[in-house]
Image (cartoon, rainbow, N blue to C red):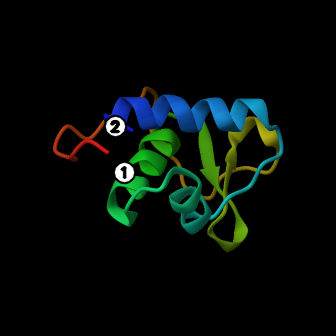
Amino acid sequence: MRTLEDALNRLRAEFLEMPGMHLTPEQVQRLFGVERGRCQAVLDSLVHARFLSVRAGGRYARVTDGEASHRSAGPGLRIDTHAQAF
């Protein structure tokens, strides 16, 4: 992936395509072939945007897929401009 925004869009698309999907950060890393810090930046941005929530066991899932998140975030999508591109 070229940019953080590309990664955000791709991960969002994967979760939209597969309702009910729950992934750990490690699974997201393997799926996209990215290093841990960049992967976490993408996941944090999607949680902040209230698209994903963190579930029991540290798994990420769409907010609309059920149980409430135990991590809250403000509205809007925040992209860490200090993160390097994928």
Q: Secondary structure at mark 2?
A: helix
Q: Amino acid at mark 1?
A: Ala
Q: CA distance from mark 2 to mark 1?
A: 8 Å
- Which is nearer the N-term, disc 2 or disc 1? 2
Give the number of the disc on residue 4: 2
The x and y percentages for residue 45 are 42, 42
User: On screen, 55 above or below 64?
Assistant: below
Question: On the image, which quarter does residue 50 sit in?
Answer: top right
Q: Amino acid at mark 2?
A: Leu
The answer to whether residue 11 is left or right of residue 18 is left
Question: On the image, which quarter does residue 7 sit in?
Answer: top left
The answer to whether residue 39 is left or right of residue 62 is left
The x and y percentages for residue 20 are 83, 45
The x and y percentages for residue 62 are 70, 41
Q: Residues within 10 Å of mark 1 (few under 14, many from 20)?
A: some
- Identified at 52% across, 44% down, the residue is 47
- Identified at 67% across, 36% down, the residue is 14
- Identified at 21% across, 46% down, the residue is 84
Q: Count of labels shown?
A: 2
User: On screen, 32 above or below 74?
Assistant: below
Regarding residue 73, the answer to whether it shows in the image is no
Q: Are marks 2 and 1 in contact (CB under 8 Å)?
A: yes
In this figure, which residue is indicated by the disc labeled 1? 41
In front: label 2 or label 1: 2
- Identified at 52% across, 50% down, the residue is 32
Q: Quadrant of the N terminus?
A: top left
The x and y percentages for residue 41 are 37, 51
The answer to whether residue 85 is left or right of residue 73 is left
Q: Secondary structure at mark 1?
A: helix
Regarding residue 49, the answer to whether it shows in the image is yes
Camera-side residue of 56 and 1: 1
Q: Residues within 10 Å of mark 2 (few under 14, many from 20)?
A: many
